[in-house]
Image (cartoon, rainbow, N blue to C red):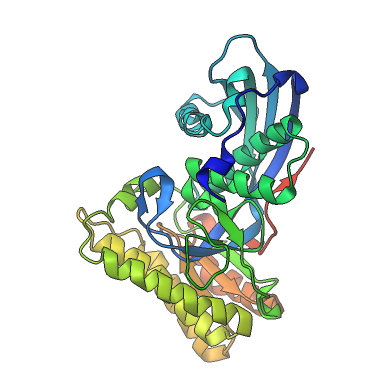
Amino acid sequence: MNIEDFIFDRSVDVNLAMEGGFSWGTPSNIALVKYWGKKDNQIPANPSLSFTLNNCKTETSLIYKAKSDKGISFDLLFEGQPKEDFKPKIQKFFERIVKYCPYIENYHFIIDTKNTFPHSSGIASSASGMGAMAVNIMSLEKLLNADMTVEYFNQKASFLARLGSGSACRSITGSVVVWGEQADITGSSDLYGIEFPYEVHPVFKNYCDTILLVDKGEKKVSSTVGHDLMHNHPYAEQRFSQAHENLAKLKNILVEGNLVEFMALVESEALTLHAMMMTSMPYFILMKPNTLQIIEKIWEFREKTSIPVCFTLDAGANVHVLYPMGDKDFVQTFIRQDLAQYCQNEQYIDDEIGTGSLLIK
């Protein structure tokens, strides 16, 4: 699909949908090969691959009502209460997508959103939040274009979500999602995420992710600032090349079920992301002492038990503990007894691989 394929006909008759509403639940995701650095128009500097989560999601309802005057118009609620400080991000999102969804100017929207996980807990709420916005908008578009296919719905929803938050394009559909052009992955695109197009080994089909909340505060560095730090970074080009190489390796690992190579690659990717932040200008250390304690404990546990548990990190202090469903009881006992003490208020979230956005009503 090309960008032009996502531009909706401006002559649409809004009388096909005068008023109504939808509600969607869209999960967050955790990147295994990290996207860090972007070009204009939310295009990634390198491809990425993520596991879609199941429990950590944003639930968003969108009520629409046709109006006589044209222009972007909406009210925003968070957990049923007005949330003015969220509005600029939604305004920017609408401004970015209006070229592709001109019909949004014909409606006033009431948006009510909530998360099943703590806001600013280091879980990608922008991914789930913008993903939920995108599928709601596409539900409206489907009313205006009854011939729309499921494939087009998902591709355009991912395309729109990317314009709100890059990683959001990986939260629309699928358990394993690739975003960014990669020579050896059929159908991969910079414009939207695609479901991993190969048969995944059974061991990876129901993988678990326990998120250890080391620091639930606001991010020290926003994702936008973090991505911008890759411009003129001394190691940027090597990193972008490495991401392509690691994605090619991970493709084979996911098909073959090689857990040893999976753990090594995923942990290396996580540490590389933080290394890029530490070697940028200005530089940042996003880990906390407890982050390092947890990593050491995971390595000790893995060495002692041979249980294939590993970690990954986003651009923050919290730790995602990844492990096969078959080892869930052992690993969760380890987390309760040895790792919870390093979490803020001993809080962590148990999650697992999910399948993407779901229509609630």
Estimate the x, y position of residue 133 in percent, counting from the top left.
61, 37
Look at the image and tell me whether residue 320 can be seen: yes
User: How many numbered dots are placed on residues in this image?
Assistant: 0
Relative vertical location of residue 140 with respect to residue 277 in this rendering, above or below: above
Q: Residue furthest top?
A: 68
Residue 158 place in picture, x, y as percent: 58, 48
Residues 119 and 29: in front is 29
In the rendered image of this protein, does residue 344 appear above or below residue 299? above
The image position of residue 101, as x and y in percent, is 58, 31
Q: Position of residue 306 (x, y in %)?
A: 57, 90
Left or right side of 139 for 361 = right
Q: Identify which residue is drawn at 47% across, 84% down.
A: 300
Q: Residue at x 64, y 72 (%)?
A: 332
* Residue 46 vs residue 207, the one in the foreground: 46
Quadrant location, the C terminus: top right
Position of residue 281 in the picture relative to residue 219 (left or right):
left
Visible in this render: residue 349?
no
